[in-house]
Image (cartoon, rainbow, N blue to C red):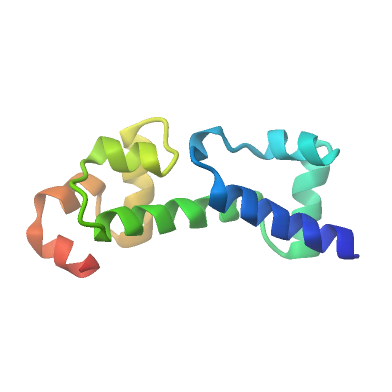
Amino acid sequence: MKIEKDLVVLTKEIIENAPDLSRIRAGLLAESFGYSDGGYCDLLQREGGIKFSHLLEAERKKRCVELINSDKPVNVKSISKACGFTNTASASRCFKKWFGFYLMDFKNNPDLQMVFR
C-alpha cells in the first residue's frame, strides 16, 4: 500500500531532519501518524522492511562520522549529545559496536583518528 510506503519515507525524513535525536521516539511518531506504538513499528517492519530502531541508529552513526570528519573540535560529550544519546556511556557502547573501539579510545589515539580522515 502506498500510504505505508509514504510512512516509511516520512519517518526517515523526520529522523534525518531532527535537530535533537534524543527526542525522537517511536511512540511520539506513531501518535502523530495516528497509530499505536506497536502498530506503527509493525507497519514499518512489514511494509518498509525496517525497524524504527535501525532508522534511528543509522542516523546516529551518520552524524557521529560527520562530526568526527568535521574540522570542529569535538569531545566525547559533544559527540554523544549531537548523536542523540542522553549519556556518554551509551554513545561509547554504540561506537564500539559500530567501529570496534570505544569513543574515548578514539579520542585519545591519533592512529585511530586517521581511520576517519
- Kindly identify the residue that appears in the image at 42 percent across and 30 percent down: 86
- Kindly identify the residue that appears in the image at 33 percent across and 59 percent down: 65
- Kindly identify the residue that appears in the image at 71 percent across and 34 percent down: 27
Residue 5 x, y percent position in the rendering: 80, 63
User: Where 114 falls versus 102 (above or below)?
Assistant: below
Residue 38 x, y percent position in the rendering: 79, 40
Q: Nearer the viewer, residue 22 or 71?
A: 71
Tell me the quarter of the image containing the N terminus.
bottom right
- Locate residue 59 relative to residue 32 in the image: left or right: left
User: Where 52 falls versus 81 (above or below)?
Assistant: below
Q: Nearer the viewer, residue 34 or 107?
A: 34
Q: Residue furthest right?
A: 1
The mark tally for this picture is: 0
Quarter location, residue 44: bottom right
- Locate residue 59 relative to residue 8 in the image: left or right: left
Quarter location, residue 2: bottom right
- Locate residue 58 relative to residue 12 in the image: left or right: left
Residue 14 x, y percent position in the rendering: 63, 48
